Image (spheres, rainbow, N blue to C red):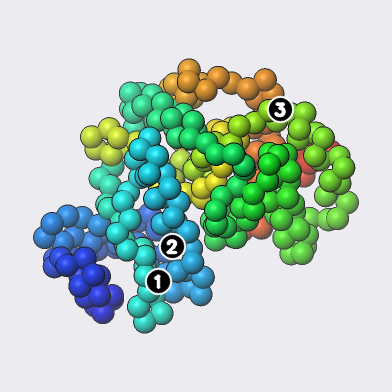
Amino acid sequence: MFKLLSYISTRISEKIISTKPVSGGDISSAYLIESEARKYFLKVNSNLCALEMFHAEQKGLQTIEQTKTIAVPHVHLADTIEGKAFLLMDFIESKRPDMSDYIRFGEVLAELHHCSQKDFGFSTDNFIGSLPQRNNTHAGWAEFYWFERILPQLQSALKAGLIQQNIIPKEKDVIPLFQEIFGDVKPSLLHGDLWGGNYLISTNGVPCLIDPAVYYGHSMVDIAMSGLFGGFGTEFYNAYHEIIPKTENYLQQIDLYQLYYLLVHLNLFGSGYYSSVSSILKKYF
């Protein structure tokens, strides 16, 4: 750790005066680093693909930052030393959200979702948790969601023996159904993994996104994920939908977008998520 801190100190041209372990690194070790000038949040990971994951996280945070819509911690370094990959970013002092914070959060997330491009996908692949997430571009949302999101997770689950071949729907059935339920979708810049652990409200009331898995997709994907495990106040949804109204097939879209994240959890954590996955597949296919 000493060599890592010394290297970081040299790179940022600041003397580090304290460091302590903190929660929030998820699959990485996390530390609060304090220099004479400011506080930093440091993630450290020795896994083989750790630097690739940190570069993807850096690109995602910088992409959101460049929109000037919703705040993210500024990334200072993503590098490796002696087999340890690390990501250094601003430390966000946070607080428990109140009603006004949820309102502001809903508003600025809607602003982020108004950022668009021509096609669905992203310039590079990234990760959802520790799993690879493909972002090949598609002109059609139904095709993107099937080929880049649902199908790869189904194939991984099948290979791991977590599902059976007979519950995997056929492309000829999926694409028309997706087109019908999703409707005419405009590409929106998404956080991509918006559960309750991936946002902070700073002590001065500014909503901040962390740990993104960004790409351009249907704005409802972030809304669906936000509802899967809770942690978002009613005021958040009311404020968001004042700007981006609820879609025609709102509840069906939530089901089908939560399917992706349930498949991810099935592949990450095992058969405890099988019943949730199979129930959605049986309901729609």
Q: What residue is shown with label 1?
A: 85
**Horizontal and vertical percent position of residue 130:** 55, 61
Q: Quadrant of the C terminus?
A: top right
Q: Residue at x 51, y 75 (%)?
A: 48
Lower sequence index among marks 1 and 3: 1
Farthest residue toward the left?
Answer: 36
Label 2, residues with CA under 10 Å away: few <14, some 14-19, many ≥20: many
Horizontal placement of 117 versus 179: left or right?
Answer: left
Q: What residue is shown with label 3?
A: 183
Q: Which one is closest to the eye, mark 1 or mark 3?
A: 3
**Horizontal and vertical percent position of residue 21:** 29, 63
Three-letter code, disc 3: Gly
Q: Quadrant of the N terminus?
A: bottom left
Three-letter code, disc 2: Phe
Q: Residue at x 78, y 55 (%)?
A: 163
Marks 2 & 3, CB-CB < 8 Å contact: no
- Judged from the image, the secondary structure of the residue bearing numbered disc 2 is helix
Q: Which mark is residue 54?
A: 2
* 185 is higher (above) or lower (below) than 166: above
Instruction: Answer whether residue 54 is visible to the viewer in this image.
Output: yes
Lower sequence index among marks 1 and 2: 2
Q: Residue at x 40, y 39 (%)?
A: 67
* 86 is higher (above) or lower (below) than 92: below
Q: Residue at x 87, y 42 (%)?
A: 172
Give the Cα distance between marks 2 and 3.
35 Å
Q: Which mark is residue 256?
A: none
- Judged from the image, the secondary structure of the residue bearing numbered disc 3 is loop
